[in-house]
Image (cartoon, grey):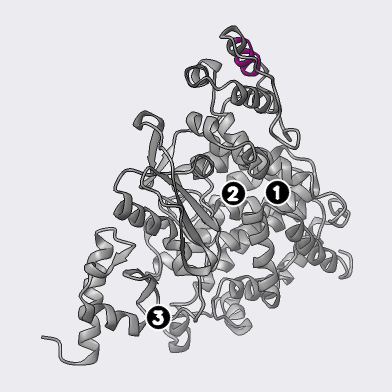
């Protein structure tokens, strides 16, 4: 029997651990005894969501921290809905399409359909809510289970979603439409349901993305069946790029997002200086930026570092096995990894300055940057060797962000499309701004995505002759807010302005 306070808390933590090992995220009162619940709540390991429901939390999170909730949101909703409706529920067609195309951003309000719905709004933490409405749900053949959530399949969702979805979520709508290879996939649903008006809307939507053949066949078939179908385009803008080739919804969404955001970049960024004539002098300036860059980049990620530590790493005098002070830093920072990665990035910059396509250079070398960045962490036992195996194989979450990166199954498709776009674009601003943003939007690695994104940004800057640019830790709040606006609100302009100001300031240093 545990007797001390520490032993009692340890016993309660063992109970919580057992639940987590079973995959339980939404913890109900019946899952833990009252004694264990109260003990875990008091210690900060359990956070109430609503009466009788809890989620696990970290005791070191400040009051008002939203991370635990946003990382638990989808699993909590899944558990709650199954508890209330069993399997007799489905997310709205609009939310289904958003998830089916890889967007897991936490919505302000999650709309759920169920024959047992009561039009009840369930208030949840941090301004989120769940609204269930009484409505029929699709037949089983028209539904999927996606990470435990009951969702529409793409074609039934396109038919049932409201016309406003195409203007409010154009990237997801276009990505979903582009999964349809032939009119024969969608016509049975349209003809069987007598959906003449919806057919006209979808024909216009297909034509918007460049799939004229599908649009024509829908109109012809509906009219042949006696419907007076009139084509109408539900989008408020033209497709930024024709999607005539059917590709995965993940690739389609990245492509549509890139092209749409690229149109908002003009006039914000400083003009590129041009590739430098004296490459060695340029690289010398990059070397001189290392200490400040390492300090700010690592500090942005929450590591407690000092210029003195960074300098010791650069000089090769950092020895955590012999120096007790350095030993204290092992749990917060693998500083050697940043130095090694910085040198690998410098090598890539030298190649770019010789005239190679910067997108292709980064595509083939970014894996090496990552290995360098985390190799020492694996050696020190601070990371698993499997973390060096390439792109992530599990979920990741961002602290205090409503944006949830795509599932690991979407990462490879998105990264392939990202590098295609990065290597094909000739717009300097798109290379720099979208290169950084889209990389961290995909979040391809388990850790280090911010540092990798800033390395990538500087590689793209070098390709246009811009000086190495540091994101100062003092502006971390502005930086994260701009990324949030782009990730959640799809507004790239604040991030472009933020990066543009830093780049402009970096150019005021003496010319190389």
Q: Nearer the viewer, residue 144 or 165?
A: 165
110 drawn magenta? no
Q: Would residue 285 be found to the left or right of residue 144 on screen?
A: right
Q: How far apart are labels 1 and 3 at the CA level?
A: 47 Å
Q: How far apart are labels 3 and 2 at the CA level?
A: 39 Å
Q: Would residue 405 be found to the left or right of residue 239 on screen?
A: left
- 303 versus 142 height, above or below: below
- 349 versus 88 height, above or below: below
Q: Which mark is residue 351?
A: 1
Residue at (50% x, 34% y) in the render = 157
Q: Is residue 422 among what the camera can see? A: no
Residue beneath disc 3: 59
- 107 versus 166 height, above or below: below
| Quadrant of res 54 | bottom left
SS label for mark 2: helix
Q: Is residue 218 among what the camera can see? A: yes
Q: Position of residue 440 (x, y in %)?
A: 59, 55
| Disc on the earlier residue, 1 or 3 | 3
Q: Quadrant of the N terminus?
A: bottom left
Quick one: label 2, few (<14), some, or many (20+) residues within 10 Å? some
| Quadrant of res 151 | top left
Q: Position of residue 256 (x, y in %)?
A: 66, 39
Nearer the viewer's eye, disc 1 or disc 3? 3
Q: Look at the image and give the residue range highlighted in magenta.
A: 213-220
Q: Would residue 408 be found to the left or right of residue 16 on screen?
A: right
């Amino acid at each position: 029997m545990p007797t001390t306070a520490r032993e009692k808390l340890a016993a309660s933590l063992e109970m919580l651990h057992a639940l987590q090992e079973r995959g339980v995220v939404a913890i109900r009162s019946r899952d833990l005894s009252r004694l264990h619940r109260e003990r875990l709540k008091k210690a900060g390991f359990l956070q109430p969501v609503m009466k009788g429901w809890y989620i696990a939390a970290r005791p070191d999170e400040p009051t008002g921290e939203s991370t635990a909730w946003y990382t638990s949101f989808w699993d909590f909703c899944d558990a709650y809905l199954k508890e209330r409706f069993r399997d007799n529920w489905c997310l709205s067609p609009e939310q289904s399409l958003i998830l089916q195309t890889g967007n897991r951003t936490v919505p302000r309000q999650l709309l759920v359909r169920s024959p047992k719905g009561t039009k009840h709004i369930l208030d949840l933490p941090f301004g989120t809510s769940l609204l269930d409405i009484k409505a029929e749900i699709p037949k089983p053949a028209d539904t999927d289970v996606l990470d435990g959530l009951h969702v529409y399949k793409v074609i039934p969702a396109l038919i049932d979603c409201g016309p406003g979805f195409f203007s409010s979520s154009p990237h997801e709508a276009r990505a979903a439409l582009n999964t349809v290879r032939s009119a024969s996939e969608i016509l049975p649903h349209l003809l069987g349901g007598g959906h003449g008006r919806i057919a006209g809307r979808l024909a216009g939507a297909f034509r918007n993305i460049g799939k004229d053949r599908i649009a024509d066949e829908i109109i012809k078939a509906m009219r042949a069946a006696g419907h007076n179908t009139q084509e109408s385009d539900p989008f408020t803008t033209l497709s930024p790029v024709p999607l005539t080739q059917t590709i995965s919804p993940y690739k389609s969404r990245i492509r549509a997002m890139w092209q749409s955001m690229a149109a908002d970049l003009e006039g914000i960024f400083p003009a590129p200086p041009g590739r430098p004539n004296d490459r060695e002098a340029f690289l010398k300036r990059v070397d001189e930026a290392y200490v400040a860059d390492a300090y700010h980049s690592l500090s942005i990620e929450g590591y407690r570092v000092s210029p003195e530590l960074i300098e010791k790493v650069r000089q090769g005098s950092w020895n955590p096995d012999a120096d007790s002070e350095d030993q204290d830093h092992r749990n917060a920072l693998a500083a050697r990894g940043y130095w090694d990665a910085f040198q690998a990035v410098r090598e890539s910059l030298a190649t770019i300055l010789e005239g190679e396509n910067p997108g292709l250079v980064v595509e083939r070398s970014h894996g090496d940057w990552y290995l360098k960045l985390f190799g020492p962490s694996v050696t020190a036992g601070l990371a698993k060797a499997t973390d060096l195996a390439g792109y992530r194989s599990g979920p990741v979450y961002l602290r205090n962000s409503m944006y949830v990166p795509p599932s690991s199954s979407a990462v490879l498709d998105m990264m392939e499309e990202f590098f295609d776009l990065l290597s094909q674009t000739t717009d300097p601003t798109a290379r720099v701004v979208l290169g950084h943003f889209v990389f961290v939007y995909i979040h391809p690695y388990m850790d280090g995505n911010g540092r990798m994104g800033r390395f990538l940004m500087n590689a793209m800057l070098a390709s246009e002759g811009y000086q190495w640019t540091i994101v100062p830790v003092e502006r971390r709040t502005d930086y994260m807010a701009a990324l949030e606006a782009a990730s959640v609100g799809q507004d790239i302009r604040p991030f472009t302005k933020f990066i543009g100001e830093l780049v402009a300031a970096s150019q005021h240093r003496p010319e190389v």
